[in-house]
Amino acid sequence: MNTAADVGGTNIQAGLLVLAAADVIRLSLPWQMDLNSCHVRTLVEESRDPEGFARLKELAGTERWASASGGRARRALVRIMVAKGGCLADITVGDVLEYDTELRRTARGVSGGGTLYYAWLRELGHLPADAPTTLRFLERVTGQLSCAQLVDRHPLASGPIRALIVDYLEERRPRLDYSTLDNLARHLTRNFWADIERHHPEVDTLHLPADVAAAWKERLRTRIQRRRRPDGSIEETIVERADRVMIFIAVRAFYLDIARWAGEEPGRWGPWVAPCPIKVAETADRKRLTRTKARMDQRTRERLPLLETFARAAAEHHRVASAHLQTARSVPPGGRFTLDGAPYTRGTNPASAAARDAQGRLVHLDRTEHRAFWAWASVEFLRHTGVRVEEMLETTHPAMIQYRLPTTGEIVPLLQIAPSKTDVERVLLISPELADVLATIIRRVRDPKTGLIPLVTRYDDQERQWNAPAPVLFQYNRGGEPSTLNSQTIREILKETVAYMRLTDATGQPLAFTPKDFRRMFITDAIRTGLPPHIAQVIAGHANINTTMGYNAVYPTETIEAHRAFITRRRTLRPAEEYRTPTDAEWEDFLGHFERRKLSVGTCARAYGTACIHEHACVRCSLLRPDPAQRGRLVEIRDNLLDRITEAEREGWLGEIEGLRVSLAGAESKIDQIDAASGGMPINLGMPRKAPAQPARQEGAARR
């Protein structure tokens, strides 16, 4: 039977279900996907394998067994038994994979029970010892690709060039981690040779003509950034490519490695030796690095003074969320309670802490407390260790070790950091504050039945592979199955803490904290408080001390102190009376200067202690700042000057005309300044020019 339509009538369907529960007939998985009867689940559990389900209930616990996720897992096991026959002990890994495939085909992977039913089968001990530790190990994970697969993600038309790049990646793979190999393959294919073939299909050799190489470099300066608008359309913007230098470095290394290897294996690499199109100077973008360093330093200086405030806010957020959760759990299902003055109604599921507010919105208080706890734990762990976020998430219970000091015999706790970016293992001293945090995490994740940290398999996003099961500290109960946190979740819960404390930057935007910020602040604070940089380098796990100093955002203390000393020495060379306390008369004169700056048409900007160079002909002075409200008065002054110039010309007062014209030009200039300021137009000051010389006869007449 393939569809429910093949069965006619309710009675016939009920009879089929009874027969299937008794293992007389078997119903296919696709047919069961449209059937969500809890009666069938109960019938199979009680009649088919009562002992197996009773043992499973004991292992799962009453609360998990009655929860929504437990109900979905039980339904998944019943469906497999109805389709395949037998009991719980007869379910195989292949049966589970077939059921999981059908769930994904019908887009019901989450509602079908997740992966809890597989975890229960492992706990029962019915699966082989070499079976995957989690069902997620087999789903939606691509794993590591081969070098040929990495290259074929961006198909190349030239077969020889493709084979060369694949061979080159195979040669370098043993010395690179997978994420670096992935980026290198992308740079050499999509960003380099695929672009060359798209714009210059006639080129089939690494010996690139100068114009082809120059055109490729120019195209690499920018990229198209696509952003989805609120209406659903795509907005395309041309932006500067940030990884341009990294692509240049990869391509240059590609050419130089081939040239170097040709000396050792000329038959293999010799035919591909070609001049490198990338010069050394093109692999160093000092201006961009300087701008990035300045931006990161400013980011660190902006957040470091708020680190303690942020840590207290994270602790307070978790305290409030925990109190809310306890309040909700103290109320029976369906009961009413109040949080921060707002009414809530708890859900009917006794195993859940979900509640609805006055508007009917569903609030998961247990999830809120879960995220608030891990936000607090992450903040404390990162700020006390300065480790990378992937190193924090890989920390296990056995990583906490003891060390006896050879000099005093004192035992100190150490935290062992697993090899990460530099593949170098290191240990950190556990401070009392960090010890409290680790103890709190252990109490939270410890299995209440066994008292041990559950073994969990973690997927490494960088290496694209599953790690061996380990007692990882940063784990949680994911629907009844242990699961690890990932870096994206850590970033999200840090944002939630910022939103809780309403912390903003100078522009009013939320002051975001990322795991990288805590690493920068740790190194900066350590060096600022006297830790030698080479010791900070070892603690941070950097291979180069320049990398450590790049994280350091300490202000240049030596420069600041030297500048202060220079100012002190300069003050000693100046007259001592300049630094004495002014008398009352001097202070009154100083204040009176600013009181006398107000004029009828504006404000005088003359500095204190300077004389007026225009003998108080303010309309002529460039230091006069005209008041827009006095424009009418300036117009009256201009009109009066025009009348006086007309009168002087009529009476022949040539000597007075020049002075009046200077005042007229000053008045018109002040009016233009007011008009330009009100209209937003720039002020045209003009170009200076030499006045033409007057004839000698006119000069003599002027003297007479």
Image (tube, rainbow, N blue to C red):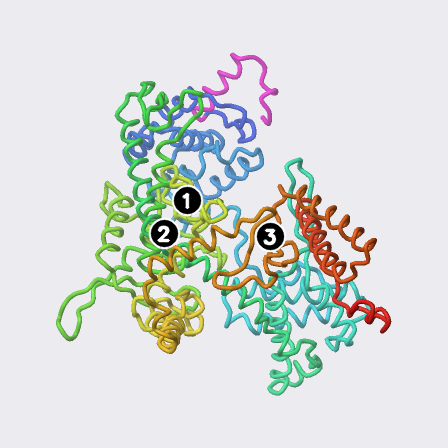
Based on the displayed image, in which of its 4 quarters is residue 216 positioned? Answer: bottom right
Q: Which residues are magenta?
A: 1-23
- Label 3 amino acid? Arg
First of labels 3, 1 by sequence position: 1
- Label 1 amino acid? Leu
Instruction: In the rendered view, tell whether residue 681 sits above or below residue 400.
Output: above
- The nearer-to-camera label among 3 and 1 is 3
Q: Magenta stretch containing residue 691, yes or no?
A: no
Rounded to the nearest angstrom, the CA distance separating label 2 from label 1 is 9 Å
Give whichever of 11, 658 is nearer the camera: 658
Instruction: Name the residue carrying label 2.
Output: 306
- Residue 688: percent from left, percent from top: 74, 67
- Label 2 amino acid? Leu
- Which element is circle 2 on? helix
Q: Residue at x 49, y 45 (%)?
A: 509
Q: Is residue 562 shown to the viewer in this render? A: no
Marks 2,1: beta carbons within 8 A: yes
Q: Looking at the figure, which quarter contains the N terminus?
A: top right
Instruction: Name the residue carrying label 3.
Output: 625
Q: Residue at x 45, y 44 (%)?
A: 93
- Residue 28: percent from left, percent from top: 54, 30
Rounded to the nearest angstrom, the CA distance separating label 3 from label 2 is 43 Å
